[in-house]
């Protein structure tokens, strides 16, 4: 390495003093994974996309935002010493809660059975979302696994992300609840673009048909653009992995669902990084402003 190289340790010191190193932190793409109906596979989608992105060399963080009934740590066979409940109570910082998952996937665990966590006030949501700005580890993507439904908390985590993935299964209630959620997101929270992931489907054709069913009604009645992210097949290996408290991408990497997760992660990797802050409550907003982006 030449002495003039800009990555030479000595040449970084004045920049650090001027705070320029922090200003160079790259933008983080935040993707919230949600659903109308519960039990459709959000946590498996979030965990396995996180693992697949980490395995591909990205630097993802997974936030368990099912604040009342957290289970990302359970699904990964990890035990959380400190959770978001400790952060909210001022007992520790956000960085102190982070667990290391497969391939270096960072996990911010939530608590289970603490009712006040499931009913945070708007000011507490703002405080929590802003607290992420202090995280100092290498980071380029954050996945946010939410609870089901249209609570204020779920809607806020969707609004504060650049992308929303709605997980849907081929069941009437899952489809109507997904539609209801998309309607509330677009009408009340200004979300104008939603990615749809079909889970537990029998074939790619079935997944695509399910997406089109949802897109047809949304196009007709809502001011929102739906895009099809893709499908994850129904897979007994995934159930087995859940029993073993391992992500299917780790326990059975050549199973049909693990392959699908890797393919979907590859699609997500090709998305452009977020370009501009949109002027409302947003995760990591200062990194976008640092990178020179403000919405017109
Ligand atoms: N692709 C799949 N193939 C087979 N079973 C699946 C698949 N996806 C999810 N499941 C089953 O559905 C269960 C629920 O999945 P998961 O916990 O990820 O859903 P969720 O949407 O996060 O639920 P909640 O709304 O309670 O948070 C899993 O434990 C598994 O048994
Ligand atoms: Mg879940």
Image (cartoon, rainbow, N blue to C red):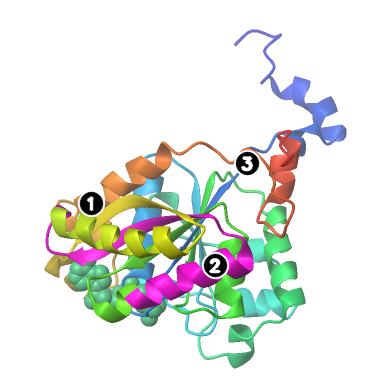
Q: Earlier in the sequence, mark 2 or mark 1?
A: 2
- Residue 260 marker: 1
The residue at 28%/52% (across/down) is: 230
Disc 2 on helix, strand or loop? Answer: helix
Q: Earlier in the sequence, mark 3 or mark 2?
A: 3
Discs 3, 2 touching: Cβ within 8 Å: no
Disc 3 packing (10 Å; few <14; some 14–19; many ≥20): many
Does residue 101 appear anywhere in the picture? no
Does residue 137 appear anywhere in the picture? yes
Q: Is residue 17 left or right of residue 154?
A: right
Bounds of the magenta segment: 176-204
What residue would you read off at disc 3?
A: 27
What residue would you read off at disc 2?
A: 185
Classify the position of the C terminus by image quarter: top right
Between marks 2 and 1, how big is the CA–CA gap? 27 Å
Q: Quadrant of ligand 1?
A: bottom left
Residue 201 in magenta?
Answer: yes
Q: Earlier in the sequence, mark 1 or mark 3?
A: 3
Between marks 1 and 3, how big is the CA–CA gap? 27 Å
Disc 2 packing (10 Å; few <14; some 14–19; many ≥20): many
């Amino acid at each position: 390495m030449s002495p003039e190289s800009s990555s030479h340790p000595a040449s970084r010191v004045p920049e650090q003093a001027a705070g320029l190193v922090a200003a160079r932190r790259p933008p983080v793409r935040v993707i919230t994974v949600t659903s109308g109906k519960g039990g459709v596979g959000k946590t498996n989608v979030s965990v396995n996309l996180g693992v697949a992105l980490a395995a591909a060399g990205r630097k993802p963080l997974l936030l368990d935002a099912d604040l009342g009934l957290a289970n990302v740590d359970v699904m990964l066979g990890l035990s959380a010493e400190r959770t978001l409940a400790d952060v909210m109570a001022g007992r520790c910082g956000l960085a102190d809660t982070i667990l290391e998952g497969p391939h270096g996937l960072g996990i911010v665990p939530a608590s289970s059975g603490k009712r006040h966590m499931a009913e945070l006030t708007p000011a507490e949501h703002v405080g929590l979302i802003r607290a992420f700005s202090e995280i100092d580890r290498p980071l380029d993507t954050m996945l946010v696994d939410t609870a089901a439904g249209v609570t204020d908390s779920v809607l806020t985590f969707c609004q504060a992300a650049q992308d929303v993935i709605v997980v849907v299964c081929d069941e009437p209630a899952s489809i109507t609840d997904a539609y209801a959620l998309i309607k509330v997101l677009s009408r009340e929270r200004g979300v104008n673009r939603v990615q749809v992931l079909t889970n537990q489907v029998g074939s790619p054709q079935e997944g695509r048909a399910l997406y089109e069913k949802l897109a047809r009604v949304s196009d007709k009645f809502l001011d929102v653009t739906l895009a099809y992210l893709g499908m994850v097949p129904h897979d007994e290996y995934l159930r087995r992995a859940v029993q073993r408290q391992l992500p299917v991408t780790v326990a059975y990497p050549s199973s049909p669902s693990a392959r699908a997760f890797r393919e979907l992660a590859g699609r997500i990797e090709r998305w452009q990084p977020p370009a501009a802050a949109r002027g409302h409550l947003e995760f990591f907003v200062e990194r976008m402003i640092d990178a020179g982006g403000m919405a017109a």
